[in-house]
Amino acid sequence: MSLFGGSISALQNGLDYSTLKNQTISNNIANVDTENYKAKNVVFKDVLNNQLKSEFQAKRTHEKHITFNQFKNQPFQIVSSKNTQYNHNGNNVDVDKEMSDLATNQLYYQALVDRLNGKFNSLQTVIRGGGA
């Protein structure tokens, strides 16, 4: 039995995604002047769709059971943008775009943290007997 019905796990996955995205954006900004560096991005949707179409297998004990799908790895990955070039040195990092993505990601991360705090505050209220 799950205490929160999987919501803590979903929030954790969201935080993992946001943390990886923050690291990727930071690397892009740090390499803005690196020759031939290609900007990287964290993708989720494409990986999810590919996983849903292919590898998902579950052990079925009866032929009439519906197959179930499970992720073997994290449902997101880092990919390079190779089809653009902004600078004369082969680098394609757009600092303005990266800074905008960083601000958006920070808002997303903070929203997840606030929601997680709400879950723990609810649990704390229950433990204290409902009264403050």
Image: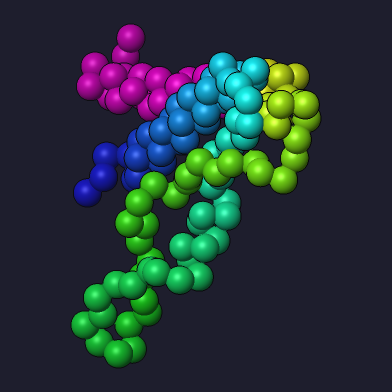
Which percent across, then down, holds residue 22? Answer: 52, 24
Q: Quadrant of residue 90?
A: top right
Give above or below for 93 relative to 59.
above
Quick check: can you spot residue 105? no
Q: Nearer the viewer, residue 79 or 68?
A: 79
Task: Give x and y (percent) for residue 69.
Answer: 38, 66
Which residue lies at the image location 22% right of the left edge and 49% below the top edge? 1
Residue 131 located within the stretch drawn in magenta: yes
Note whether 30 is above or below 78 in the view shown: above
Q: Which residues are magenta?
A: 108-132
Answer yes or no: is residue 96 visible.
yes
Taking the spot 41% from the left edge, 33% from the top edge, the residue there is 16
User: For this view, does 92 lie left or right of residue 108?
Assistant: right
Residue 104 falls inside the magenta stretch: no
Percent position (x, y) of residue 18? 50, 30
Task: In this rendered view, identify the residue nearer to me: 90 or 101.
Answer: 90
